[in-house]
Amino acid sequence: MPPQYLYIYYITLIMVNKSYDFLVIGSGIAGVSFAINAAKYGSVVMITKKQDSDSNTNYAQGGVACVLGDDDTFESHVSDTLIAGAGLCDIDAVKILVEEGPPRIRELLDYGVRFSTVDNVAAEGASLYNLHLGREGGHSVNRIVHAKDLTGRELEATLLMKLREFDNITILENHCAVELITGHHVKNASNQYECFGAYVLDSINRKIFPIAAKVTCLASGGAGHVYLHSTNPAIATGDGVAMAYRAGAKIANMEFIQFHPTTLFHEKANSFLISEALRGYGAVLRDAGGREFMSKYHPQSDLAPRDIVARAIDNEMKISGLPCVYLDVRHKDARTTIEQFPNIYNQCLSFGINITKDLIPVVPAAHYICGGVMVDYYGNTNITNLYACGETACTGVHGANRLASNSLLEALVFSHRAVIDAAERVGKCRNIDTNDIPDWDDSGTHDIEEWVLLSHNLVEIQSVMSNYVGIVRSNLRLDRALRRVNLLGKEIEDFYKRAKITPQLLELRNIVTTAKLIIVSALKRRESRGLHYTTDYPCQNNKKSFKKNTIVSNRRKAPMSTGLKICQ
């Protein structure tokens, strides 16, 4: 065995049949924040599919929306969020998000996060009162706290450094969650819908073992790779949502998929994100003839909410027949542009585009899921002892369309609240008897010899979703997509039952499940609202019956958990 794997192998061996207080699935800002705070109350194990820094957080460029400026108010941030959410936001959840934001930013500064300041002072000089505040689409004032255009990378690196200070946190890289362990698996369990941990695949040694936990937190990120083109890393395959759905959790608002309006259009760029902060800085969208076009779609022009900008670009592309539009920042001071957006400048330059002199070709790409595993204000799902945070969760904050840079704030605020609730729960739970959890049984399965067929299935799912369940939809397209995805789902499930499990097979199974949830949810919403636009119902319906969440569950009754539940 190569030396670099010896430590991981040793950790895996001692993990088998071991019980922890907290199991965290995912290593983005939500998962790491939850783990850091949970370590104050008990033992924590965090698993991540690749390296601990591989997450959607690491790719976030823009920043964290937070009320810190003298010209800003909580009421203003709440209002901007509600407007973007198109009537579906939970106003109480939004108030929690906004009002509990400043303490979380202060906490990040205490950890050592190097946010940009108004006078570009060193990180040690940063405080709540001299942070540089940017502006993005849908915001009425400057309120985006950022670290130039690499905010996610700075947050992830600092939080992981903080995480490693705790001796009672175990990090397992290259480990994938296979299924949640619920009462269906555990001997003599009194509640089928109680979570006891998860079965986990060691991707290096190809072994599956159970991790028992009093509390499990799903923080596995989004599902951008359900689509052909996405700003997300390859690990964003809807794992948390799919596992929770199979375990009996409520899944809400999956029809609202946010397409980031501006990703770099270049065959080798892999949908590189051009931050919305560039438009907040003054960049202008133009068509192939150099004409500005956003003013005819929305009063806020280039700073309109993302759903409007994405649909406008999609429409302009259809009118022109061209595969992209252009972002123009040439009129801004070149030195300032390079100083504020070094990552975007260097990345574009590597593809032969000098953003201070050239137009930037851009196109929308799948970016963020506004729905997810339905939770209460403390991250509880309707499965006892199972929490969800970050993009995996649906807190009610985003409604039908996420306001720019509210996602990192949501992860910070609600993961913090989830730990408050979970700590009390852990204190009342007995230790899990690992002998009551059966070993994973893969007898009768065989190694994959037909991966090429599965890789074709992956491309077909992504193509179906991009072509029929994208920015503009119709009943005909959605019905066609559902028929094809149902067929693919049966093929993949049959293969899953016969084959030795690999990370690729797990991801494919989760992708097809998530794709189906998106389609079914889209068919349920017979209106156009926020990110869901259908040509069959092109208007938003303001009747009360339409202002509600779209909920999907695979069990007949799935009540939300309320308060603490005494463990058996």
Image: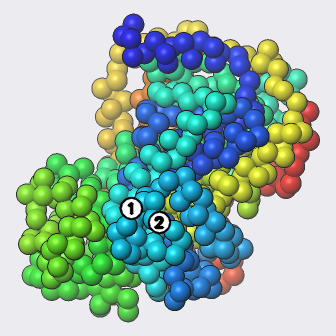
Q: Residue 433 in the image: x percent, y percent?
A: 82, 20
* Placement of the N terminus among the 4 image quadrants: top left
Q: Residue 353 in the image: x percent, y percent?
A: 10, 62
Residue that label 1 marks: 122
Residue 178 visible in the current orientation: no
Q: Callout 2 environment at 10 Å: few (<14), some (14 to 19), or many (20+)?
A: many
Q: Residue 190 in the image: x percent, y percent?
A: 89, 32
Task: Identify the mark at residue 371; answer none if there is no mark.
Answer: none
Q: Residue at x 16, y 48 (%)?
A: 268
Compare residues 200 and 486 and report the one nearer the observer.
Answer: 200
Residue 20 visible in the current orientation: yes
* Left or right of residue 292, residue 132 in this image: right
Task: Identify the mark at residue 126; answer none if there is no mark.
Answer: 2
Q: Is residue 436 shown above or below 79?
A: above
* Placement of the C terminus among the 4 image quadrants: top right
Q: Residue 129 in the image: x percent, y percent?
A: 52, 75
Q: Residue at x 88, y 30 (%)?
A: 430
Q: Secondary structure at mark 1?
A: loop
* Left or right of residue 238, residue 320 in this image: left
Q: Callout 1 environment at 10 Å: few (<14), some (14 to 19), or many (20+)?
A: few
* Left or right of residue 299, residue 75 in this image: right
Q: Is residue 459 shown above or below 199?
A: below
How many angstroms separate mark 2 from mark 1 (CA)? 7 Å
Q: Tag 2: residue type?
A: Ala
Q: Is residue 123 shown above or below 532?
A: above
* Left or right of residue 424, residue 56 in this image: left
Q: Residue at x 18, y 57 (%)?
A: 346
**Mark 2 and mark 1 residues within 8 Å of each other at the beta carbon:** yes
Count of labels shown? 2
